[in-house]
Amino acid sequence: MHLYGLKSCDTCRAALKALRGAGHDVAYTDVRADGVKSSDLERFIAEFGDAIINKRSTTWRGLSDAERSAPPLELLIANPTLMKRPVIEADGTLHLGWSKETQQTLGIS
């Protein structure tokens, strides 16, 4: 299992703690500190479309209209914190966010 998030994100920390507490071996990638490979970003975009862009973030609000009109891959490469998170990869399936549905799917009560 692999979790992509931010170490400073409360939701990502809660997800990581719950997953490890449930016995999952979780690899962690901090999108700001570690970066994310373009190939992974392309997979995320293919799976989630524009939903992968967090348009409620302070990073998004700080972008100009011209910057916001860039393709999602370019946006995420230039501003990795724009990625909605966490992105969790489990058994070849990608999950976006830490919703109750995601938690149930991953065996978290």
Image (spheres, rainbow, N blue to C red):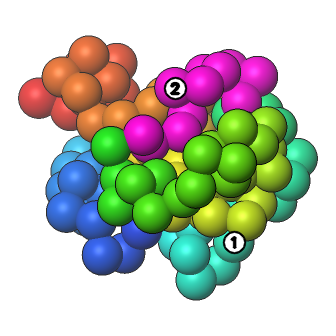
- The vertical placement of 99 against 98, above or below, is above
Q: Residue at x 53, y 49 (%)?
A: 83
Any part of residue 89 in sight = yes
- The vertical placement of 104 against 17, above or below, is above
Type of the residue with mark 1: Gly
Q: Residue at x 60, y 46 (%)?
A: 65
Task: Name the residue nearer the viewer: 66 or 1.
Answer: 66
Tell me the mark number nearer the camera, choosing from 2 and 1: 2
Q: What range is drawn magenta here? A: 45-55
Q: Where does the image place residue 14, in percent across and percent down from the top left?
A: 19, 56
Task: Name the residue nearer the viewer: 58 or 7.
Answer: 58
Give the residue at mark 2. Answer: 51
Type of the residue with mark 2: Ala
Q: Residue at x 33, y 43 (%)?
A: 56
62 left or right of 89? left
Reply yes or no: does residue 77 show up in magenta.
no
Q: Where does the image place residue 38, in percent across and percent down from the top left?
A: 86, 53
Q: Quadrant of residue 12?
A: bottom left
Category of crowding for the residue at label 1, using alpha-carbon neighbours closer than 10 angstroms: few (below 14), some (14–19), many (at least 20):
some
Q: Where does the image place residue 71, in percent across and percent down from the top left?
A: 79, 37
Q: Residue at x 11, y 29 (%)?
A: 109
- The vertical placement of 34 against 91, above or below, is below
The majority secondary structure of the magenta stretch comes to helix
Q: Quadrant of residue 31?
A: bottom right
Q: Which label number is shown at residue 92?
A: none
Task: Name the residue nearer the viewer: 84 or 11.
Answer: 84
Give the residue at mark 1. Answer: 35
Instruction: Please count the marks in the image.
Output: 2
Reply yes or no: does residue 54 show up in magenta.
yes
Which residue is the extreme one toward the right? 39
